[in-house]
Image (cartoon, grey):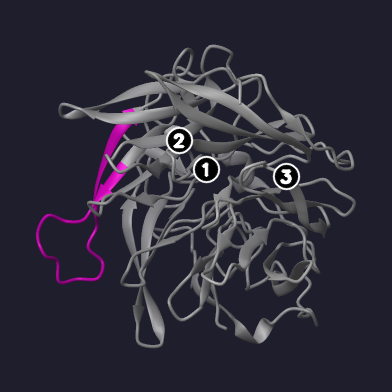
Amino acid sequence: MGENSMAQHRIVPSIFDINLRPSTAALISLALLAILLMVPSAQSRAQTFQVIHNFTGGTDGAVPLAGLIADRAGNLYGTAAAGGTGLFCEEYGCGTAFRLKPAGAGWVFAPLYEFQGGVNDAANPEARMVFAPNGVLYGTTEGGGIQNCGTVCGTVFQLTPPPTFCRSVLCPWDETVVYRFQGGPDAGSPSYGPLVVDQAGNLYGTSINGGSDGYGDVYELARSGSGWSETLISNRFTSSPMSGVTFDHAGNLYGALEAGYDTTIYQLSPSGSGWQLNQILTVDGQAQAGVIFDGAGNLYGTTADGETGGGGTVFELSAGNWNFSLLYSFSGNWGPRESLTMDSAGNLYGTTYEDGAYGRGSVFKLTPSAGGWVYTDLHDFTGGSDGSAPISNVVIDARGNLYGSASRGGTGTNCYQGSSYGCGVVWEIAP
């Protein structure tokens, strides 16, 4: 497929004009509505839902904008965009990285690192972390690093387990900033999408600023001596990539671009010493989440708004010809803002940001059935102690339990400059 070739599918024009990239400070200071609806939805399975951590805005952090990842032992890892003891992030804090470890019938929360901000450290993580094969965690931050992008350009960081055995469950990890974005012709401001690691240990991600046209890039970070070198593998975008990228089995990268009310799914294919940009498909509705593949090579993605219900969509592109299928259309305001998760049976799971019975977000499941997909509402957030506004993927453990985060709500009170709207939660849904 050539660089300018593009198959196009149009749905119903979006009725929303949403700014999908507010600053971290704006997200943190955004107040929820004062009236909190606490009646559980008849369609949700509230009896299976529980909060396993309430963020307090202290050393544990506040406002978990990113989702979670899990290791083989069932430990959960995540970040909070604010809170902590960092001194260079005004009154909100610079954010934290954390681990939740199963312990009997409960969980033990352990802060792994409190970001400090400024030119010497990272600040305000907004994307999921990722494990490298050697057990090191990598992630990105919106803040910290070189300050010549109008505000800051952001960083890529790594977290390494302590070099010696630690008997305490609260042992911090060692943090290193491996790259500081410089803006301008370089990338700037990493997107909400997580990094991806190839078999050689190289890191790939996206940025929403920088590059030759200022719309952001797909970048590669490769080890170079004792440091890392950056290569922009695509700086020809005409809109900003809000999501990260993912590999197929052939080594091609795929991602989503939003342009006005549209989303373009793109492919980057290795070509000689560079990469060839191919536009696959354009649909109406703005995408903030990335795409995933199933075992047959079919691709699945979401939009955060658009379609007849206005609350976003879940769609499939069939392997080989990329034929478009609309799997589900949400009603409400903002739909999915993170990538889907597929289990071994082929079911899809995700969250919505402001859809659901109370307009505070939801957790959903889509089950393949003859001739279509069956939607199941797993939980509707109320904005109270259960949380609100999830920008999270869904993690599935070996027993079928689901985990994720909600960026607001909960019982924490030391956040949003004393606001009582909560600092966010980590939740579990048991089957």
Quarter residue 263 falls in: top right
Mark 3, other Cα within 10 Å: few <14 / some 14–19 / many ≥20? some
Q: Earlier in the sequence, mark 3 or mark 1?
A: 1
Q: Is residue 252 left or right of residue 17?
A: left
Looking at numbered disc 1 in the image, what kind of residue is underneath it? Gly
Q: Where's residue 356, x and y in %? A: 77, 65
Q: Find numbered disc 2 in the image and state the secondary structure of the residue it sits on.
A: strand
Residues 231 and 250: in front is 250
The region drawn magenta spans: 158-179
Residues 339 and 16: in front is 339
Tag shown at residue 323: 3
Q: According to the image, label 1 marks what residue? A: 193
Residue at position x 71%, y 27% in the image: 6
Instruction: Count every numbered label the image shows and give the total.
Output: 3
Quarter residue 430 falls in: bottom right
Q: Earlier in the sequence, mark 2 or mark 3?
A: 2
Q: Earlier in the sequence, mark 2 or mark 1?
A: 1
Looking at numbered disc 3 in the image, what kind of residue is underneath it? Asn
Q: Quadrant of the N terminus?
A: top right
Q: Is residue 409 left or right of residue 305?
A: left
Q: According to the image, label 2 marks what residue? A: 205
